[in-house]
Amino acid sequence: MRVQEKEALRITHVRRDADGDIAQVRLHDGTVVDLDQAISLADAHKIAGVMVGAARNGRQTLKGIADGDPENNLQNLPEF
């Protein structure tokens, strides 16, 4: 069951690894979770604006849901 948009968590910042891939995310409430935890939350529809997809290497990853606003794309979020 999907969480209502107003109740859902939102990703506000990202932390990248040495390869430039997202390794951790900071949520709007200040919580920091690693990518696997974020994928689990997204799979449970608890994070707004993202879905789980497959990276080129076959691993699961987060993908932003296109909404026409480039400022909230995962690739454009500020780092922490």
Image (cartoon, rainbow, N blue to C red):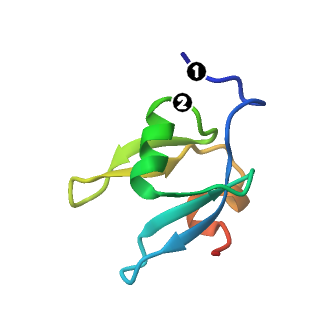
Which residue: 54% across, 15% down? 1
Q: Which of the pair 80/74 is nearer the observer? A: 80
Q: Position of residue 51 (x, y in %)?
A: 48, 40
- In the shown orientation, is residue 13 left or right of residue 6? left
The circle on residue 45 is: 2
Q: Secondary structure at mark 1?
A: loop
Q: Position of residue 4 (x, y in %)?
A: 70, 23
Residue neighbourhood size for the residue with mark 1, other residues' Cα within 10 Å, grouped as few (<14), some (14–19), many (≥20):
few
The circle on residue 48 is: none
Q: Amino acid at mark 1?
A: Arg
Which residue: 56% across, 60% down? 25
Q: Amino acid at mark 2?
A: His
Label 1 with label 2: CB-CB less than 8 Å: yes
* Most distant residue in the left direction: 58
- In the shown orientation, is residue 50 left or right of residue 60? right
Q: Secondary structure at mark 2?
A: loop
User: First in sequence: mark 1 or mark 2?
Assistant: 1
Q: Position of residue 69 (x, y in %)?
A: 72, 52
Which residue: 65% across, 55% down? 31
Quadrant assignment, res 52: top left
Q: Is residue 66 above or below residue 73?
A: above
Q: Which of the pair 3/75 is nearer the observer? A: 3
* Most distant residue in the right direction: 6
* Most distant residue in the bottom direction: 18
Q: Position of residue 22 (x, y in %)?
A: 46, 66
Q: Is residue 34 above or below residue 60?
A: below
Kindly identify which residue carries mark 1.
2
Quadrant assignment, res 66: top right
Which residue: 63% across, 68% down? 76
